[in-house]
Image: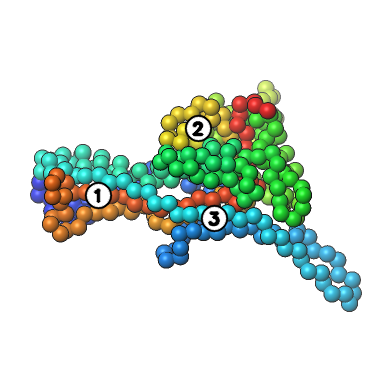
Amino acid sequence: MELNIVTLPQFTRLAGVIFEDGLKAVEMNAKNSGIFQMESIPANSGNTRDYTEIDLEQYADSKPEGNQAGRARVQVGYNKVATARRIAKDIGITIEMRKYNKYQDVVRRLTSLAELPMRRLELDLSHRLGFGTATTYTNKDAETLDISVGDTLALWSTAHTVTGVSTTYRNRLAGNPALSKGALEGMERLAVEETINNLGEKVGMSFDILWTTDDPVTVNTALEYLNSVAAPDFANSGVTNVYKAKYKHVRLPLVATTAAGLVDNTKRRFWGLSSSKLSTIHCGIWETPYLKTPSELNAGEEFSTDDWNFGVRASYGIATVVGRGNLFSSGDATA
């Protein structure tokens, strides 16, 4: 394709196609994991979204003949507000690119532009897990964000509170072991014994996601346990592997990164279990990533450079209501 015969309207249509292809090329491991409750926010509905939990008691009572039925107890839990944050990036398509048949350079630029907002969303979602041992963190834009949950504690805590009783629960595995059969069983015990509602009642909710970073040792251990036909820690091939296909394994490469997206080896062994039904890590999407194109006025050119400027825009907000529904180990054997 010869760019020197392309007009601005033609090029804009081409850019839109390349942008859509770029969006499809991005691996959205975190967004599509089931750990995060994704929600599209309608236009003109404000820049915040309040997420509040409300629990109903788990069991009905007996009703003697002629007696009035008892009222169910309802307990309002914690709330957290997600605020929309806009992200953006621009690039210029130079006149040299347009006139000197540099089509591949243009395609690479526009494809990369499409990937930027999706990668940033992946980074921000992953950092809710990777920085979950703290109540705040400073993101790549040097902004300090509150990432505490509704009880004001860090997402990964040993003493989360509930609103109806004085009982506490933990969602961080004691000893923070690396992923192994014993560690996985210990985390499953957390799911059984530490999943309660705001009235202190045990909630029997299944955990269906096993997430890890991209650390080869941790990933291979997860795959070994989830895919082996026989129990991988027994020589006897006749022993059934009870973990086969028990969880969906989600690999989250950006969990083990710094705020700027650089490698952070201190997080390489992070792993956990999540419930796609019970997790309260919400992400509201105010603006799905879209391409901003130059206008046809004045040929859409910047006067001093002759560039055609293209941009990408998106906005979203993330909030975690409670720690319930997500379990964690840092995998470094710290107390």
Which residue is found at the position 43% from the left and 39% from the top?
Answer: 142
| The C terminus: image quadrant | top right
Label 2 sits on residue: 256
Q: Position of residue 325 (x, y in %)?
A: 64, 47
The residue positioned farthest toward the right in the image shown: 65
Q: Quadrant of residue 129?
A: top right
Please say if 119 is above or below 50: above
What residue type is disc 3 on?
Answer: Val
Return the residue nearer the eye: 233 or 119: 119
Please say if 291 is above or below 92: below
Task: Give the numbered dot on residue 46.
Answer: none
Compare marks 1 and 2 and give the one earlier in the sequence: 2
Return the residue nearer the eye: 86 or 98: 86
Return the residue nearer the eye: 189 or 266: 266
What residue type is disc 1 on?
Answer: Phe
**Few, some or many residues within 10 Å of mark 2 (<14, 14–19, 20+):** many
| The N terminus: image quadrant | top left
Discs 3/1, front: 3
Which residue is found at the position 40% from the left and 41% from the top?
Answer: 141
Q: CA distance from mark 1 to mark 2?
A: 32 Å
Q: CA distance from mark 2 to mark 3?
A: 26 Å
Discs 2/3, front: 3
Please say if 177 is above or below 144: above
Please say if 46 is above or below 249: below
Q: CA distance from mark 3 to mark 1?
A: 32 Å
Element on which disc 3 rests: strand
Label 3 sits on residue: 81
Label 1 sits on residue: 310
Residue 156, visible in the rendered structure: yes
